Amino acid sequence: GQQVMQIPQYQHVQEGEDFTTYCNSSTTLSNIQWYKQRPGGHPVFLIQLVKSGEVKKQKRLTFQFGEAKKNSSLHITATQTTDVGTYFCAGRYSGAGSYQLTFGKGTKLSVIP
Amino acid sequence: AAGVIQSPRHLIKEKRETATLKCYPIPRHDTVYWYQQGPGQDPQFLISFYEKMQSDKGSIPDRFSAQQFSDYHSELNMSSLELGDSALYFCASSLGQGLAGLADTQYFGPGTRLTVL
């Protein structure tokens, strides 16, 4: 079946350092969504990318969608302790099963004060 | 703003028992999705409904069934529970499924934590 690979699985950074997580699909995605899940919480929607090469920014967060719509990244500048959590990418594919989201395994971010 | 409501929030069952989880989508949302998330795992898609009809099916076991009612709330019925069914079960809702590639952001509920003993 279709899979979305996400790396790294874990990332420990000092507060103020940057952080990046990457997602890759072997087949073209219709769109990709990013979620953040705090420990004990539920996935919270961050953003959706639809267009090839799209770049969106939310304050210190920058999201990119690759030209081939097979990969995506989330970059956080100058991390803060409030950024702690697991960041998931979730892709949607065209065709059969196109309504479901296929989640990556997530990147668990720890920020050391 | 109103969010997705799930009940119960916690549920403890014995092996071979049945369980029913309920999901109330955000008002005006017509699409509901169910996900299962094991400890330290990513959410796994189970099933979805659009306008009360099943729209997509993922890795839902045959022991599970679900439906969406006329008021758009959904119930996930789980029978012959197994230890491996212990997990967080999330419901998400969206406004219209649209076509693949169009915006239909899924908003997740707080989840139901099911423990099977």
Image (cartoon, coloured by chain):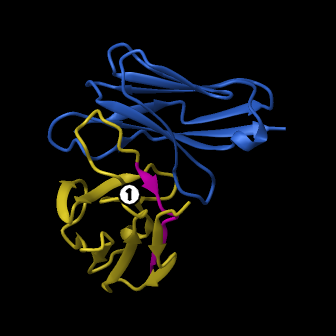
Q: Position of residue B68 (x, y in %)?
A: 25, 70
Answer whether residue A17 is visible to the viewer in this image. yes
* Residue shown at the point (38%, 75%) measured from the top left: B22
Residue at the (24%, 60%) spot, across then down: B49
Residue wearing tag 1: B93
Q: Which is more toward the observer, A4 or B32?
A: B32
Q: Colour of chain A?
A: blue
Q: Is residue B108 left or right of residue B84?
A: right
Q: Residue at 40% of width from left, 65% of height from top?
A: B25
What chain is the yellow one? Answer: B
Q: Residue A32 or B69: which is nearer the viewer?
A: B69
Q: Chain of mark 1?
A: B
- Specify the quadrant of the image occupied by residue B60: bottom left
- Identify the magenta region: B106-117
> Which part of the image, by quadrant, shows the N terminus of chain B?
bottom right
Secondary structure type for disc 1: strand
Residue B37 location (% of width, % of height):
43, 58
Residue B107 shown in magenta:
yes
